[in-house]
Image (tube, grey):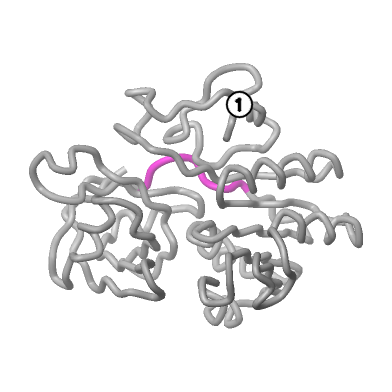
Amino acid sequence: MYQIKAKILFNEKIISGHYKMCLYAPGIAREAKPGQFVHIRIKDGYDPLLRRPFSIHRCEGEKIEILYKVVGRGTEFLSRKKTGNEIDTLGPLGQGFKISPDLKKIVLVAGGMGIAPLYFLAEKLNRENILILLGAESKGKILYLENLKNLNVKVQIATEDGSQGYKGLLSEFFFHLLKENSQIDLVCACGPIPMLKKIAQLSLKYKIPCQVSLEQRMGCGIGVCLGCTIKGKSSYLRVCSDGPVFQANQIRWKEER
């Protein structure tokens, strides 16, 4: 784990309200694994007080990228950062995806901003027989489609309004996929909790191992403050240090909303 003043190499809007930031962070880039995150102090001083967690979206050489959506004051401040600014960055943190090399067919399920950690995973796996399911409200809100086409993966899309691909929720599309072919070795998913809950339930029903990456408000980011706990099957789980990637069967989904 490193705490550094990372130099911003670029901070660009990709679609309305969504940004990609590239940071010069050699140590973090060298050690990061798909599914881990960085904890960023948005501004010097005490407003905002807490750091913000961001999935590591890509690593290239000595650089890391994060993908974020403006949802409040913290990310609004972040979107105004300029090339050359430095930002206090802590990472890599948390537990990432654990993928056995002998797995053949892997399905990555990305709902909206869920593509943030899953793109890094797809890039690192760099193998055939990976299917990525992308979900969004509409065609204009699909993230990273063109970039995914450059990887050695198959991509299928679901939009809630039917403007591209399957019309309906991504979890419904996943269910149709399972009914047609449940010969899947592993599912990895990231997105809104209701989607993850459904993906986990379907994976368990069809006896497919499933790993989920959770998004949660955090305090310390290192497992001390207990501000990001969720209920697991046998104990409370800290999203920042026990996760953010969990086996789906570790989580008591009835308690999550």
User: Where 124 falls versus 240 (above or below)?
Assistant: below
Left or right of 193 in this view: 174: right
Point out residue 43 in the picture as x, y percentages from the top left corner: 14, 50
Residue visible at 30% across and 51% down in the picture: 72
Residue visible at 19% across and 65% down in the picture: 80
- Residue pushed farthest front? 161
User: Where 191 falls versus 253 (above or below)?
Assistant: below
Rendered-image quadrant of the C terminus: top right
Left or right of 152 in this view: 123: left
Left or right of 13 in this view: 231: right
- Residue pushed farthest top? 234
Q: In this view of the protein, which residue sits in the foreground, 115 or 16?
A: 16
The crowding category of the residue bearing disc 1, from other C-alpha atoms within 10 Å (few below 14, some 14 to 19, many at least 20), is few
| SS for dot 1 | helix
Rendered-image quadrant of the N terminus: top left
Point out residue 207 in the picture as x, y percentages from the top left corner: 84, 41
Point out residue 148 in the picture as x, y percentages from the top left corner: 58, 76
> Which residues lie in the magenta part?
92-98
Left or right of 191 in this view: 198: right
Residue visible at 69% across and 55% down in the picture: 101
Q: Specify whether residue 191 is painted magenta.
A: no
In the picture of the structure, the residue carrying the numbered disc 1 is: 255
- Magenta stretch, main secondary structure class: loop
Q: In this view of the protein, which residue sits in the foreground, 93 or 227?
A: 227
Q: In this view of the protein, which residue sits in the foreground, 200 or 209?
A: 200
Residue visible at 65% across and 77% down in the picture: 163
Residue type of the residue flagged with mark 1: Glu
